[in-house]
Amino acid sequence: MNIAKIRVAEATDVQAIVQLVNQAYRPNTGAVGWTHESNWVSGGRTSVDQVMDLLLKPDSMILLKSVNSAIVACVHIEKHGSISDIGMLAVNPSQQATGIGKQMLAHAEHYARTEYGAKKFAMLVISSRIELIAFYLRRGYKKTGVLMDYPITAGVGIPKYSGMTIEVLEKPAYTIQPNAESTPHTPIYMRHQ
């Protein structure tokens, strides 16, 4: 029997998070999965130090989904006043296209509303990731028209093309998901035991 649960990440999860995120965003050439960025960006998406910094930062946390104790998905949430940034949504490539990404996004939004009092969600997406932007638009996010240069000095990989930009997407926190199955019914965000 597969037992799935969602919980808040702790320091002991850092290495597994780094492995999951890098595998989902920047797998080896020819890897499966529709969400990776290997065609646009090279190098690691994150590092142990970066993930640890996210866990230690006030009003910042990472939710994990595990199945039989193996971490299969994560998402980062960070509060900035009434806006919660949602990012680093990653699903193990072997589990992609199963609805886990939708579930994790819904849990992140729920957590941001209930724990951080978010009035709006914001996220950054590489502008050329048309299929990924479409995924978020179907979930109620809107393009803001704000484009920024790819953050080359942030340590999140090196763009393969010059002039690469990232786009800001936003969604009001009160938006109701049209698909009820993607909304968490009775979420319990427990600490690892």
Image: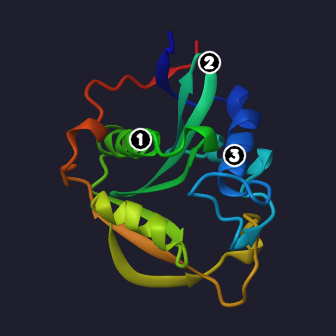
Question: Which residue type does callout 3 highlight?
Answer: Val
C-alpha separation, residue under disc 2 versus residue under disc 1: 19 Å
For mark 3, give the secondary structure: helix
Closest to the observer: 190 or 4?
4
- The mark lying in front, picked from 2 and 1, is 1
Picture coordinates of residue 55, whole percent (x, y): 63, 40
- The mark lying in front, picked from 3 and 2, is 2
Closest to the observer: 131 or 62?
131
C-alpha separation, residue under disc 3 versus residue under disc 2: 20 Å
Cβ atoms under marks 3 and 1 closer than 8 Å: no
Residue at 18% across, 50% down = 176
Residue assigned mark 1: 99
C-alpha separation, residue under disc 3 versus residue under disc 1: 24 Å
Rendered image: mark on residue 69: 2
Query: Which quadrant of the structure image shows residue 36?
Result: bottom right
Residue assigned mark 3: 51
